[in-house]
Structures are given as C-alpha cells and as structure tokens.
Image (cartoon, grey):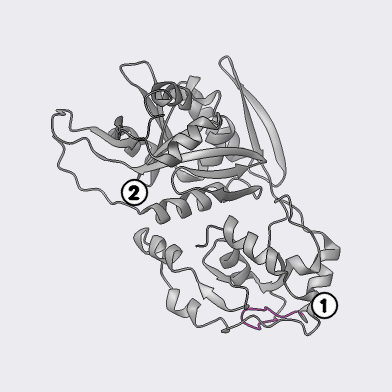
Amino acid sequence: MSTRKTKNLTKSDLRYLLIDSLKTYSDNVYYIDGNNPYRFSLNKKTTYILIRNVHESGKGRSNPDECRFQVSNSIGLVKALKSRVNVIVLGFFADENVFTAWDPLVFNNRFDSDFMDTSVKKSRSVYSRFSVQESANQNKIANYVDDNNQSIISFKPEYLGLYLENIDNIHNLDESELHKLIEFSDNENVEDFAGSISLGNEQLVVTHTRFKRDPNFRRKVYEAYNNKCAMCGIQLELIEAAHIVPHSHEVGTDDISNGLGLCSLHHTAYDKSLIYFDHNFTIKVNKNKMKYLEKMGLDGGFRKFEELAFEKLQLPQNHILKPNTENISIANQIRGIN
C-alpha cells in the first residue's frame, strides 16, 4: 500500500484551478454554474467537469504506484448526467500539478444507470498511476491503458482546453500521437488560430481564441476614465479598456457601461478573479482565490498588491458612463466570485 502524502484542494480551489487553466487556452471561456460538477462554456460549447483530488488507493490495494479518487451519486452529478452533455471526469494531483482524465463515454456508460437514484448513496472509484502523472509533469502529457482497455490521460493544466475541445477523439490516440498533438498546439499558439491535425484515424482540432479589442470601445473608455485606472488611479500609459462582462459572452457588449479603465496589473487581476467589485463599487480581494493561490505557492507579493487599490472604484461623474449593475452581477458570476 502506498504511504505517500498528497496535497488536497477544496471545491473552491478546484473551481479556480479550472477557470485559470481554461483561460490559458482561449478568451472564449467562462464559468456558468455548479458546485462540482461545474458547468463551463468553452468556445461556445457547454461542458460539465467533475473534478476530485487524486490520492493513494488505500487499503486492500497492493500496487504502490496506484492512485484513485471516488465518485458519488450527488444531486449535481445526476443533473449533469441527465442533461446528456458529456460529463468530463478529472483528477488533480497537486504534487505534480497535472490533471488525469478518464474517457467520458466510458464514465457516462458506467455511472448513468447506477447513479440515477440519489435516495441510495453510491460511490465508485476510478484509478490511475502516480508514475504516469509524474511523466506528464515532465513531458506535458502521458497516458496508460488499464485492464478494461481504457486510455487514461494525464496532462499539464494549460492543455485542459485542448483536451476538452477534442474530447470525442483524444482517448483514441496513443502516447506518441498525444505528444504530436501537444507539439502542434504549442507551435500554433497564436491569436485567433484555428486549425486541425490528422493523427491515426482521428481528426483533432486546435483553436486559440484571443478576441481583438474594438478601437472605438478603447477610445470611449480612455476618455470616460481620463486615462486613469479606476482601481488605483495610475496613468503612465498603462491604462487598458477592460470589459466587465467579457466580450466572448453572449451579453458582453462594447457599450461604455460594460467598460472600465484599468491599468494592466488590475486588468489582469480582475480577469483572473483575484480582485472584483460589488454593486456599491467597493473593491474587494477574492479571499477564496487567495486561499487557492496560497496552496499552489503563487501568493508572493500579495501584501504589496493589496496596498495598490482604492477602497472604491473611481468612476466618471456622468451616470450613463458608470458600470451597469446587471453587468456587475453577471461578471462576478462567470468569474466564479461567490
């Protein structure tokens, strides 16, 4: 039996991990709802993601390389299964900073009938290998085929979007083909790229979506905010026109009421859910995101960052130019603020 210690992330931590990972692949991504499984939109396609911490396999299992997590028939999972949208099953091994993914077709077929009755609690275990996750940490992606001939894939977080976009085909690839897909994606990681690659009998898609800013929107925001950051007041030609509701979202317009003048630091912090504001325009640090960053060892410089912001947004006097309150609610929801 394995005796290794592994780090665990909370549900909130795991949600922010998913948001951050998907945003490295595309601007056209946002959190919709759910409390594990979570529902996301990636390039306008809806996906449920069930995620758990990977840990040692426990008593009764003799292979020290084996790891697992358990899936139970929660109300949220049953709802996701009934939606007939693929439920993506991910394990996260924080020690190696990699995801492990099980074929959703196999998962849905296995749990669909067993899990529909939530009056009786049921759980099932899914298994992987520590060595495969270690290999993925070193080589970006790795896989192994279990006794049921299922390909289980481990990969670095920045490839989550690529995995989801190719969910119907990717588990049919062998490891050499998986590495070719990663290499193709890395080489074509440019703005607004959309292409495909044939691997074996499968056609795989790579789409890196980065939305271009409307120059008129930028000009209107600069003028409304006097070329200053609404969160810290800095100018120095560091001002950017930020969208409150991202323009990839169906209601994300280029109206000035959906805009905000932010410096490059606060723009990035806002889009990454580290900092946000409420209906009273009070600026707040997202404590749940900070807890996640602390666990991941990414919280350096927080005290300096916290001192940079005003208590409230510095907004235009004209109420027509101020952020729309409905946009604020939508923006906080899709950024995972709660």
Tell me if mark 2 has few (under 14), some (14-19) or many (20+) residues whose alpha carbon lies within 10 angstroms of its own.
some
* Relative height, residue 104 to residue 159 (above, below): above
Q: Where is residue 256 in the image (x, y as percent from the top left)?
A: 80, 68
Element at badge 1?
helix
Tell me if mark 1 has few (under 14), some (14-19) or many (20+) residues whose alpha carbon lies within 10 angstroms of its own.
few
Q: In which quarter of the image is residue 217?
A: bottom right
Q: Position of residue 300 (x, y in %)?
A: 41, 70
The residue that appears at 73% across and 55% down in the rendered structure is 247
* Relative height, residue 95 to residue 196 (above, below): below
- The amino acid at mark 1 is Glu
Q: Quadrant of residue 114?
A: top left
Badge number at residue 298: none
Badge number at residue 94: 2
Q: Which of 245 and 118 is in front in this view?
A: 118
Element at badge 2?
loop
* Prevailing SS of the magenta stretch: loop
Residue occupied by mark 1 = 223
Q: Identify the image quadrant of the N terminus.
A: top left
**Cα separation between marks 1 and 2:** 45 Å
Q: Position of residue 285 (x, y in %)?
A: 49, 72
> Reading the chain from its start, which is encountered first: label 1 or label 2?
2
Which residue in the rendered view is the most extreme toward the right? 216
- The amino acid at mark 2 is Ala
Q: Is residue 229 magenta?
A: yes
Q: Nearer the viewer, residue 162 or 288?
A: 288
Which residue in the rendered view is the most extreme toward the front? 119
The residue that appears at 52% across and 51% down in the rendered structure is 19
Is 301 situated left or right of 220 in this image? left
Q: Is residue 151 magenta?
A: no
Residue 140, can we see it? Answer: no
* Relative height, residue 48 to residue 329 (above, below): above
Q: Point out the stretch of residues depicted in magenta.
A: 227-235
